[in-house]
């Protein structure tokens, strides 16, 4: 099993550009989520999904969009990148005892 | 507001010097408390889940304990490879609206030296 995979690993965007961060898992988990990690702030939940076709907002959803068309994939879209979105983004899926499996992260810089 | 506070922010130990990391929380309706390990440049890796006060879990040199207001991660005779940031997170019960959300602390950065 590859677990949770994320692409790209690094990305630099200019203000106003849009992009999609990809996330896939091969563990057949229903629940998936996106977090951002900033120094001194801890991991903060952006959006989550409890299954294909169902998504909901987390703590910091503004400026981000998600969709879930399959169990395996949960992409995160930045609509119009802003410097405040410079961060490390982690995708995770959740197992049976509510433990989360995190991907390796995407390091995003917005200039 | 639900809060998770970890202390200390950073800890430097000599190899073999046992210590404890603290995670205190001010939430109601706790469903579970989780410990993760994060190495630089990587995603967090799951360590333990604790569900009720008095519960303990062990893995190699690590032991996690839970009371009604805090959790401790005890590290016994640490080795340099235990160096990492340790994160705790809490999940509320479904009835308190938190069934699908984790609240993370900011972590304790542990460095174990030879």
Image (cartoon, grey):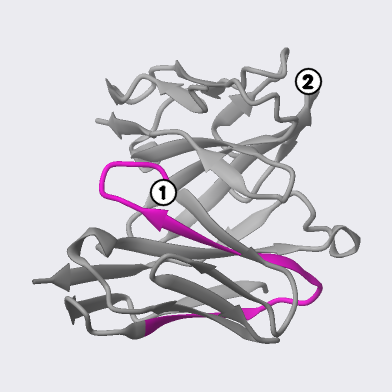
Chain of the residue that carries numbered disc 2 in the rendered image = A
Residue at 60% in and 20% down: A26
Does the residue at mark 1 contact the one at mark 2 (Cβ under 8 Å)? no
Residue B33 appears in the figure: yes
**The furthest residue to the left:** B114
Q: Position of residue B74 (x, y in %)?
A: 43, 80
Residue B59 magenta: no
Q: Position of residue B70 (x, y in %)?
A: 59, 84
Is A42 located above or below residue A101 in the figure? below
Is A70 located above or below residue B110 in the figure? above
Whether labels 1 and 2 belong to a single chain: the reply is yes
Give the Cα distance between marks 1 and 2: 25 Å
On the image, numbered disc 1 is attached to which residue? A37
Residue at 45% in and 48% down: B45
From the viewer's perspective, is A13 left or right of A92? Answer: left
Query: For the residue labelled by badge 2, is the local secondary structure a helix, a strand or a loop?
Result: loop
Q: For the C terminus of chain B, give its image quadrant.
A: bottom left
**Which labelled disc corresponds to residue A52?**
2
Q: Magenta segment range?
A: B20-43
From the viewer's perspective, is A60 left or right of A50? Answer: left
Residue at 34% in and 81% down: B8
Mark 1 or mark 2: which comes first in sequence?
1
Marker count (numbered): 2
Q: Nearer the viewer, residue B88 or A46?
A: B88
Q: Position of residue B104 (x, y in %)?
A: 54, 61
**The furthest residue to the front:** B60
Chain of the residue that carries numbered disc 1 in the rendered image = A
Residue at 25% in and 63% down: B83
């Amino acid at each position: 099993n590859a677990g949770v995979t994320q692409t790209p690993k690094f990305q630099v965007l200019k203000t106003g550009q849009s992009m999609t961060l990809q996330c896939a898992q091969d563990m057949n988990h229903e629940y998936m989520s996106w977090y951002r990690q900033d120094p001194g702030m801890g991991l903060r939940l952006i959006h989550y999904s409890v299954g294909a076709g169902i998504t909901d907002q987390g703590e910091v959803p503004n400026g981000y969009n998600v969709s879930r068309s399959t169990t395996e994939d949960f992409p995160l879209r930045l609509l119009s990148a802003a410097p405040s979105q410079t961060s490390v983004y982690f995708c995770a899926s959740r197992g049976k005892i509510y433990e989360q499996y995190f991907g390796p992260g995407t390091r995003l810089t917005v200039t | 507001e639900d809060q998770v506070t970890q202390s200390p922010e950073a800890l430097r130990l000599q190899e073999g010097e046992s210590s404890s990391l603290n995670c205190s929380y001010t939430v109601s309706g706790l469903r579970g408390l989780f410990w993760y390990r994060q190495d630089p440049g990587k995603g967090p890796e799951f360590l333990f889940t604790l569900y009720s006060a008095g519960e303990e879990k062990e893995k190699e040199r690590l032991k996690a304990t839970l009371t009604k207001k805090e959790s401790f991660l005890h590290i016994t005779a640490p080795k340099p490879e235990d160096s990492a940031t340790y994160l705790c997170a809490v999940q509320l019960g479904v009835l308190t609206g938190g069934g699908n959300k984790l609240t993370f602390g900011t972590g304790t950065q542990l460095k174990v030296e030879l």
